[in-house]
Amino acid sequence: KDLSPSETSFVEQPADRSLRLTCYGSSSAKTPEAYLREAWALGYILAKRGHVCVNGAGSFGCMAAMNDGAVEGNGHIVGVIHEMFLVDNGYGEKKVERDGGAHKAFRNLQSSSVPADQRNGPIREILVAGGKDLQQRKKFLVDKSEGLLVLPGGPGTWDELWEMACARHLGLISLPIVCVNVNSYYDPFREMLERAYEDELIKLPPHEIVHFASTAEEAVRWIEGEKSGNQKEPGKPAARKASVLKRSSFMSPESGIFRRMSSIPSFVIEETPRLTKWDELPGWARFGITFAAGSLFGIATMQWNVRNRSRS
């Protein structure tokens, strides 16, 4: 991709501080060209600005284009792959060689632990996740991350994005999340968040969960602003609209059910304590509960037997 004048000016000097940024995106060989161009620009901009680009190391789609751009910019790239993509090289060592596995950028690895004056090239690192699913890989992708940039992608990308959006909404993370909304690809995602907020299914307004940028440059500028604390104050929260869903008759104000629900004190709903898991209870508590349950069951059984005998 040929950079725009704005992008060219932006990458001429490194950022004030290097950030470790996680990038999600498609791994499909059929990814549209428009998405690939913006993915390449993202990788190149991150590299030239001095940021660490952490991604799924894919050899196709947005991930491949992003890594191509990062390689062009001599950037620090960290790839996270699952061990299923490792094969034995015949010398008892596992290498990232399986076709469709890792991007060619990771064929010659260069660790960040090597002193700068002893390196023979830009930093390229691979993190290998294990397990029977992708949970550990997803954890490795965001470990020590300072922000998330999301390019267009399929179900795997959506899964990663939704999980992190959920974690941010619950207050489990504070990482800034930005979608590179090429050709309005993520408009349905934004609309779903807005609808959930309007219907009071989520407490945070959408702009406090995920930011949407039209270009890679805009996304990187926003992330840097968030991390520097110089980002402009976010816009006003989206106003909640009246739900378009009509209440059924049993939920009408005249309904006894509705009146009973309305009479529930707010503190009962808002301050419901977290249920303690069985494994978290101390031994004496588990014993007491088991003993009480067994006693009640025994008493109920005896009463049932007595009643049956009296009837007979």
Image (spheres, grey):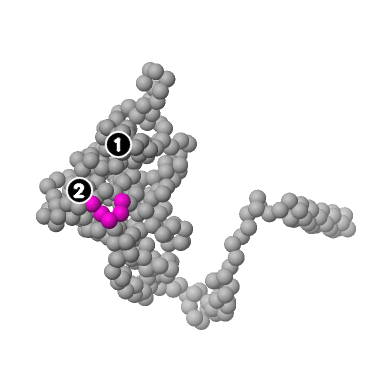
The residue identified by callout 1 is: 117
Q: Disc 1 vs disc 2: which is toward the camera?
A: 1
Residue at the image point whose x is 60% and y is 65% from the top: 273
Q: Nearer the viewer, residue 25 or 227?
A: 227
SS for callout 1: helix
Whether residue 260 appears in this view of the structure is: no
Q: Nearer the viewer, residue 122 or 290?
A: 122
Query: Can you say which quadrant of the picture contains the C terminus?
Result: bottom right
Say what amino acid the circle numbered 2 marks: Ala
Residue at the image point whose x is 34% and y is 41% from the top: 78
User: Quick one: label 1 or label 2, which is nearer the N terminus?
Assistant: 2
Magenta-colored span = 14-18
The residue identified by callout 2 is: 41
Q: Nearer the viewer, residue 87 or 230?
A: 230
Question: Is 120 located above or below residue 250 in the figure?
Answer: above
Say what amino acid the circle numbered 1 marks: Asp
Residue at the image point whose x is 14% and y is 45% from the top: 1
Question: Is 150 located above or below residue 275 in the figure?
Answer: above
Query: Where's residue 216, x and y in %?
Result: 22, 53
Q: Which quarter of the figure has residue 272?
A: bottom right
Q: Is 125 on the left-hand or right-hand side of 14? A: right
From this viewpoint, which residue is outermost toward the front?
117
Query: Where's residue 116, x and y in %?
Result: 31, 38
Query: Where's residue 234, x and y in %?
Result: 31, 69
SS for callout 2: helix
Question: Is 154 located above or below residue 255 in the figure?
Answer: above
Dot label at residue 196: none
Query: Where's residue 90, x and y in %?
Result: 38, 17
